[in-house]
């Protein structure tokens, strides 16, 4: 648990804020600054940036803007592992995350329906075993999907800012 907390704190220290000037600062100064300026869901910020504004920025300012808006893939995956769909929430993909959770729930619940209907067979117990296998599979799939969607989100904002 301590390692996870340390990893999260270090991940936060590498995500820069727009107002941060690239002065030589210590890791602890950046960490404190990013904790103070931390915003859980930064994905809405890209909607308020106009092309006129982007045309006034030089390449250094654009890279600062990109670094402030991009999401850390590993952090989103860890966050989704702790609280399902939270990584998807940070990139405005909640519906997709909930869809994966719903499919996982249905994959778990479907083999139990014959028992609810009163059917009895030895093969039904294999379905129950498959249902319990579906739990870690759906859990891993939502974590992995969170990483893929975060990567797509980062590519999207990079395209918006630099093109």
Image (cartoon, rainbow, N blue to C red):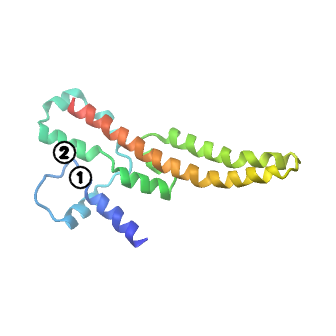
Q: Which quadrant of the structure image shows residue 42?
A: top left
Q: Residue at x 19, y 31 (%)?
A: 53
Quadrant housing the N terminus: bottom left
Q: Earlier in the sequence, mark 2 or mark 1?
A: 1
Neighbor class of circle 2 (other Cα within 10 Å; few <14, some 14-19, many 20+) is some
Secondary structure of the residue carrying numbered label 1: loop
Secondary structure of the residue carrying numbered label 2: helix
Q: Residue at x 27, y 58 (%)?
A: 34
Please determine whether, in this image, residue 110 is positioned above or below residue 2. above
Q: CA distance from mark 2 to mark 1?
A: 8 Å
Please determine whether, in this image, residue 136 is positioned above or below residue 98. below
Q: Residue at x 22, y 67 (%)?
A: 28
Residue 89: mark in rendering = none
Nearer the observer, 123 or 31: 123
Nearer the observer, 80 or 44: 80
Spot occupied by residue 45 in the image (x, y as percentages of width and height): 32, 40
Spot occupied by residue 79 in the image (x, y as percentages of width and height): 44, 56
Spot occupied by residue 87 in the image (x, y as percentages of width and height): 44, 49
Residue 120 visible in the snapshot: yes
Question: Circle 2 sits on which residue?
Answer: 64
Please determine whether, in this image, residue 30 is positioned above or below residue 19. below
Quadrant housing the C terminus: top left
Residue 85 visible in the snapshot: no
Residue 16: mark in rendering = 1
Spot occupied by residue 120 in the image (x, y as percentages of width and height): 88, 50
Q: Which quadrant of the structure image shows residue 24?
A: bottom left
Is 1 on the left or on the right of 22, as rendered?
right
Is 147 on the left or on the right of 104, as rendered?
left
């Amino acid at each position: 648990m301590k390692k996870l907390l340390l990893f999260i704190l270090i991940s936060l220290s590498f995500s820069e804020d727009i107002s941060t000037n690239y002065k030589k600062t210590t890791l602890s100064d950046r960490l404190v600054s990013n904790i103070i300026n931390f915003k859980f869901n930064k994905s809405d910020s890209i909607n308020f940036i106009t092309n006129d504004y982007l045309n006034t920025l030089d390449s250094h300012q654009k890279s600062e803007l990109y670094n402030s808006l991009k999401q850390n893939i590993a952090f989103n995956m860890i966050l989704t592992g702790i609280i399902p769909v939270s990584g998807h929430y940070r990139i405005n993909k909640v519906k997709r995350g909930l869809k994966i959770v719903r499919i996982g729930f249905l994959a778990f619940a479907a083999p139990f329906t014959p028992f609810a209907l009163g059917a009895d067979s030895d093969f039904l117990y294999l379905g129950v075993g498959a249902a319990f296998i579906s739990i870690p599979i759906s859990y891993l799939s939502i974590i992995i999907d969170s990483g893929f969607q975060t990567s797509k989100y980062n590519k999207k904002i990079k395209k918006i800012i630099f093109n």
